[in-house]
Amino acid sequence: MLILSPSILAADFSRLGQQIRETADAGAQYIHLDVMDGMFVPQISFGMPVIETIRSCTDKVFDVHLMIQDPGRYIEAFAAIGADIITVHAEACTHLDRVIQQIKAAGKKAGVALNPATPLSALDYVLPELDMVLIMTVNPGFGGQKLIPYCLDKVARLREITDDMGLPMDIQVDGGIKASNAAQVIRAGANVLVGGSAVFSGDVAANTRAFMDVFREFEEK
Ligand code: DX5
Ligand code: ZN
């Protein structure tokens, strides 16, 4: 199934609840929440109080992308405030296996993200434990960047690997994704698309529908 996960990093925070409802009503299935700590990535974004507050705005899947160092410190806290999928960076975990088990023990779906320069082999031993792999298509930390083309080769290779292993993996792409390149990333093998500026700059409902139109073309085939 093709899924749009709008990243609220690019939303108008003074009208956050309303913008979340607009994209959800137009067809977005997830809401992508970018938590940044100013250590793993340069910026500080938002944390638990914001996520907890907006949880009541929608029953859509909360897809929490933790760009924080040693995320194992906070898994239970994010689970308690309503995260449905918790994604941690392989580069940020000294004990990645333990953190994945923590997410699963909390009853949540487990995702691992890889920065552009991190090889897929970082996941060799944990792939069967995961619900989702997030292939970063930009260097994390900022919205509005351009997609790095070689990351699509990584998506394609990962889809081959998970198919060969018989794993029904969600493969998410994040960074520089737009309705105009959505078909390309889907063809590479991604099925969960994060859109920040492409969803929240301008008309949120129309931007969301532009992604849904691309999804429909694939689903009708
Ligand atoms: C980047 C974040 C993204 C960001 C994407 O580090 O993980 O989720 O919001 O923004 P766009 O879609 O504008 O590249
Ligand atoms: Zn993200």
Image (tube, grey):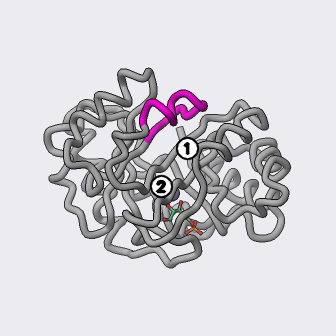
| SS at badge 1 | loop
Of the residues shown, which amino acid type is indicated by label 1? Answer: Leu
Magenta-tinted stretch: 75-86
The image shows residue 7 at horizontal and vertical percentages of 62, 56
Mark 2: give few (<14), some (14-19) or many (20+) Cα within 10 Å: many
**Image quadrant of residue 153?**
bottom left
Q: On the rendered structure, is 154 left or right of 194?
A: left
Q: Which mark is residue 186?
A: 2
> Which residue appears at 72% of the width and 59% of the height?
210
Residue in the image at 39% along x and 51% along y = 134
The image shows residue 157, relative to residue 112, as above or below, that is below
Q: Is residue 182 above or below residue 132?
A: below
Asked which secondary structure carries label 2, the reply is helix
Q: Which mark is residue 73?
A: none
Instruction: Indicate yes or no whether the magenta region holds residue 78.
Output: yes
Mark 1 or mark 2: name the one nearer the start of the chain: 1
Is the residue 117 above or below the residue 49 in the image? below
Compared with 173, 165 (above or below) is above
Residue on which the image places disc 1: 2
> Regarding ligand 1, which quadrant of the image does it lie in?
bottom right
Horizontal arrangement in the rendering, residue 108 relative to residue 162 (left or right)? right
- The residue closer to the viewer here, 195 or 35, is 35
Residue 220, image quadrant: top right
Q: Residue at x 42, y 23 (%)?
A: 106
Quadrant where the image shows the C terminus: top right
> Quick one: 116 or 2, which is closer to the camera?
116
Tell me whether circle 1 and circle 2 mark residues in contact (CB < 8 Å): yes
Q: What's under tag 2, amino acid-wise?
A: Ile
Measured from the top left, where is residue 15 in percent x and y?
A: 84, 56
The spot of residue 92 in percent (x, y) is 29, 54
